[in-house]
Amino acid sequence: MDSGAGWSDPDAAGVRSRVLPARSALRLRRQRRRMDLDPEAPRLWPAGWREMAIEWVRGKRDRARWERVLGAAGPSRATLAHHVLDALLEAGWIAVDEVRDARGHWSPMSFEWIDRERSAAALGLPDAAALRRDIDAAASTAYRDPRLAALADGLAGRPAALALRRFAILQALDIWLADGRQGTRRQFALAASGDTKGLADADWRWLDESVELSSLGIGVHTPGIWLRAPLRLHLPTGVLDLGSVGDALALTPATLEAVSVVEGAVARWRILENRTSFEQAARARGQVDGVLWLPGFAAPWWRTAAIALMRRAPAPVRIACDPDPAGIRIALAVGAACDAAGLAWRPWRMRAEDLGALTRRKPLGDYDRAELARLDTDPQARCRFAGLIDAMREGGEKGEQEGLDFRP
């Protein structure tokens, strides 16, 4: 802002003024400001003044119309607003544009921050430049788990404090997953924040809606693999005939680890992410096929136990997940485990046609778009899911398995 010629001598408060162009000679305009900034001024202000100044400095623009500022303050705080305007002006933090009415009275029209970031820091708010540096550093973090990279991408453009808090959660979660840890919410919160209650409810919802807490090794109960298959499992205590059960059942990792021999065969191994779809397929196909429920981004113990079982009764594997970006990532993770075990696999009901057949679809969210961009450059994802990826990108929508029929 120009502080050269055209300014008057300073008044008793050190404020200068200059004439501004006006549309009418009868409606004069002027600008007032102090040429030096006093960063210590807030220490002498009443608490109410500081609170209102903080409201203003948090605005999205450097210039604010006085009419709107007064409207936001309301009648009960109009006098306070005038006091704060004068205090900011006399501290050199703002320049005020005024207009003179027919009676010769000057009234504010707008004000502009001289150095908003410096003013915010003087009021005790976080240094915006430092926050941006911290966010840039956190955003460049490399994650060992690909799910977390997409979650981090989805934090772009979010409020600084929220983004930094969640970047820290993701970094702690990456360590948790790399160490293969299991535990309760409170145990993870302690690991992530040093406090068993250190994560907000909104942060838990964010994690659970994106990747499902159970798949992160964060839960409450003893985990189990839900399945139905025409197999007989030999255990130290006897033989468990899965074929004698007319519905699905759950087996703990310890039970599956204790299996010494598997009798029988399956035509296909069918792995389904959605619980309702799994139960539908298990009832319809479980007498011939092995049907497993995949709890979202399956934890390492699930993949280890499921692969061990399927290797003892080898058959082609079909993986069905939600036709959405997260579903593709989930299917790829399980598919990679199948590849490593020598089990041939392919997607099931995860084509563009399946997404289009759904009567209800949802718009892609921030996480979905970030994940979709990553999948679009992943050769394995393009090889297996090119049609679905293109359909989601072009249509901007995703789907859920519940709308598909897995009985045939």
Image (cartoon, helix red, strand yellow):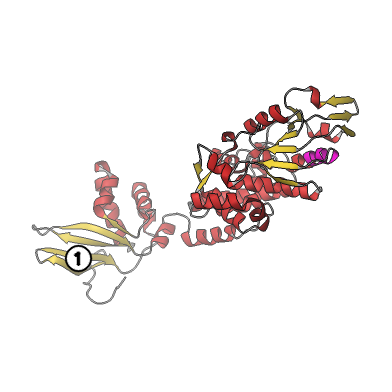
Image coordinates of residue 24 in percent, x first then y, are 11, 65
Image coordinates of residue 216 in percent, x first then y, are 68, 42
> Is 245 or 113 nearer to us in this picture?
245
Horizontal side, residue 187 vs residue 26: left or right: right
Image coordinates of residue 405 in percent, x first then y, are 61, 33
At x 71% / y 46%, what residue is drawn?
Answer: 346
Horizontal side, residue 397 vs residue 43: left or right: right
Horizontal side, residue 271 vs residue 1: left or right: right
Indicate the amino acid at tag 1.
Arg
> Is 141 or 362 nearer to us in this picture?
362
**Residue 70 in sight from this viewpoint:** yes
Label 1: element kind? strand
* Residue ranking furthest to the bottom: 5
Classified by dominant secondary structure, the portion drawn in magenta counts as: helix
Q: Quadrant of the C terminus?
A: top right
Q: Quadrant of the N terminus?
A: bottom left
User: Within the image, what quadrant is residue 194 found in?
Assistant: top right
At x 56% / y 53%, what residue is drawn?
Answer: 390
Q: Is residue 122 magenta?
A: no
> Is 321 or 193 nearer to us in this picture?
321
User: Within the image, what quadrant is residue 186 found in?
Assistant: top right
Which segment is the magenta one? 305-312
Image coordinates of residue 98 in percent, x first then y, are 20, 61
**Residue 14 in sight from this viewpoint:** no
Q: Is residue 307 magenta?
A: yes
The residue wearing badge 1 is 30
Q: Is residue 178 above or below residue 302?
A: below
